[in-house]
Image: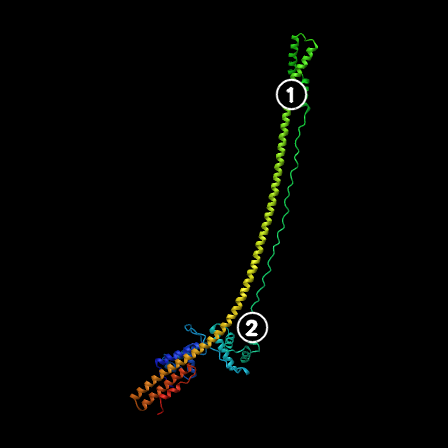
């Protein structure tokens, strides 16, 4: 069983830092990277516990629960997009397909980058090709795709054809509403004036004849008074007396008939005038009412037609405005889509360049960290050897040096592997010259 001794604090810190850097690049956990290195270099679970100062059985229990299982990225570790697809580029004059192992490696790295940066593996592969000026046809050749496969994917996913701007809709036209026929006015029937018809019985002659023929007491009295006067003159039995009686009766009846005929004439004229005035007023009122009604109906009809035309104009204006707005919106969307595609193409290329720059920076940091850690181990080991040389001699001195030699080489091997498989353990031999 190998003799594993705990590493110093600086050495352990350096190993943990290197394991964390590799985990960041691979998308796995630092524990996974540390255990993977131990497995590849023949370091047992107990050896890992001893080197790193873990409690006994810690590494074995972790391996039992996690080894050969997908390693989840720890929630506390922010994984940056640091991976880069490595394609061995053949000369442009003779691009040849990659071997199966290289293609599988490229696809695995594309999946890792796509997962880290939030897009598909195909997009990650395309970004790398664009950043390294590899044409779509060469991607098909390298990866064994059918000719035109990469271009077809690009057309469908990277630069979709911008939709044509829709044509503006034809403006709606206004057909004015038909006017209703005007309401006509029919005047009332012409007014016929009332006429006064003379009643012969109401004239002075008619009344006088009627009164004389009635032999009323009034006429008898008038004749009696005339006979008395004639008797006083001694002419009662003469024809003069008879004539005087008749004359007295006519005079008396004539006064009454004359006054009565005037009364009748005035009453008839008054009634005719009143009837004429009433008829004229009624006809005028009917004519005015009919004219007013016709004007009101015509005005209402014109107002209604104007309102309908105004509403039609408003509706057509709204329709035209909606059509123009819809066209502007669709054009805006189309322009935005085209601008977005251009921006995405720029972003993809920038992301690919950023990935390459980040990888270069991380590789440099790995080497710097490895150099610092190796220097610390070498200095510490050199100090330990100097102390052994001062205090021990013989076999005990050599055994202790051999132990430090083994321990230092193991530490440097771990650091070199984490730095990118750099062999720095060989430099420890300069501290242990052959006896």
Residue that numbered label 1 is attached to: 258
Q: Residue furthest right?
A: 239
Assess whether mark 1 and mark 2 are in contact (beta carbons under 8 angstroms): no
Q: Residue furthest top?
A: 234
Task: Describe residue 246's horizontal placement relative to residue 46 as left or right.
Answer: right
**Picture disc at residue 299:** none
In the rendered image, the quadrant that contains the N terminus is bottom left
Dot 2: within a 10 Å radius of its alpha carbon, few (fewer than 14), some, or many (20 or more) residues?
A: few
Write the residue at 53% across / 67% down: 337
> Looking at the image, what colour scheme do you see?
rainbow
Write the residue at 65% across / 20% down: 258
Task: Describe residue 124's horizontal placement relative to residue 410 as left or right.
Answer: right
SS at mark 1 in the image: helix
Q: Earlier in the sequence, mark 2 or mark 1?
A: 2
Q: Nearer the viewer, residue 88 or 429?
A: 88
Q: Is residue 95 visible?
A: no
Please tell me in which quadrant of the rendered image residue 280 appears: top right
Please tell me in which quadrant of the rendered image residue 389 appears: bottom left
Q: Position of residue 210 (x, y in %)?
A: 68, 20
SS at mark 2 in the image: helix
In the rendered image, the quadrant that contains the C terminus is bottom left
Write the residue at 61% across / 39% down: 289
Q: Position of residue 244 (x, y in %)?
A: 67, 12
Compared with residue 97, is residue 321 higher up or lower down, i.e. above or below?
above
Compared with residue 366, is residue 229 higher up or lower down, i.e. above or below?
above
Residue that numbered label 2 is attached to: 155
Q: Position of residue 154 (x, y in %)?
A: 54, 73
Compared with residue 193, is residue 125 higher up or lower down, i.e. above or below?
below
Dot 1: within a 10 Å radius of its alpha carbon, few (fewer than 14), some, or many (20 or more) residues?
A: some
């Amino acid at each position: 069983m190998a003799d594993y001794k705990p590493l110093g604090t600086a050495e352990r810190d350096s190993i943990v830092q290197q394991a964390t850097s590799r985990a960041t690049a691979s998308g796995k956990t630092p524990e996974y990277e540390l255990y993977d290195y131990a497995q590849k270099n023949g370091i047992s679970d107990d050896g890992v516990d001893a080197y790193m100062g873990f409690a006994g059985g810690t590494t074995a229990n972790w391996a039992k629960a996690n080894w050969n299982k997908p390693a989840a990225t720890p929630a506390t570790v922010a994984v940056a997009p640091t991976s880069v697809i490595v394609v061995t580029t053949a000369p442009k004059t003779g691009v040849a397909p990659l071997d199966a192992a290289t293609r599988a490696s490229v696809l695995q790295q594309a999946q890792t980058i796509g997962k880290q940066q939030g897009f598909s593996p195909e997009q990650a592969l395309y970004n790398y090709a664009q950043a390294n000026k590899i044409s779509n046809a060469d991607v098909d050749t390298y990866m064994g795709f059918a000719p035109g496969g990469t271009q077809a994917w690009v057309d469908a996913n990277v630069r979709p054809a911008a939709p044509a701007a829709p044509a503006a809709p034809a403006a709606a036209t206004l057909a004015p509403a038909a006017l209703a026929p005007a309401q006509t006015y029919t005047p009332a029937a012409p007014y016929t004036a009332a006429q006064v018809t003379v009643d012969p019985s109401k004239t002075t002659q008619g009344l006088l004849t009627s009164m004389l023929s009635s032999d009323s007491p009034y006429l008898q009295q008038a004749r009696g008074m005339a006979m008395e006067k004639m008797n006083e003159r001694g002419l009662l039995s003469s024809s003069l007396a008879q004539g005087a009686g008749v004359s007295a009766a006519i005079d008396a009846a004539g006064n009454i008939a004359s006054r009565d005929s005037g009364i009748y004439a005035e009453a008839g004229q008054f009634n005719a005038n009143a009837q004429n005035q009433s008829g004229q007023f009624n006809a005028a009122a009917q004519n005015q009412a009919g004219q007013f009604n016709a004007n009101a109906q015509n005005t209402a009809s014109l107002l209604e037609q104007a309102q309908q035309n105004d509403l039609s104009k408003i509706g057509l204006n709204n329709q035209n405005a909606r059509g123009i707005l819809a066209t502007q919106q669709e054009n805006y969307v189309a322009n935005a889509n085209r601008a977005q595609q251009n921006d995405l193409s720029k972003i993809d290329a920038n992301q690919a360049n950023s990935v390459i720059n980040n990888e270069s920076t991380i590789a440099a940091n790995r080497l710097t960290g490895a150099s610092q850690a190796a220097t610390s181990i070498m200095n510490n080991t050199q100090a330990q050897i100097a102390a052994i040389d001062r205090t021990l001699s013989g076999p005990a001195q050599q055994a202790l040096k051999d132990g430090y030699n083994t321990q230092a080489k193991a530490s440097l091997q771990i650091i070199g592997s984490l730095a990118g498989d750099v062999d720095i353990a060989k430099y420890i031999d300069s501290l242990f010259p052959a006896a």
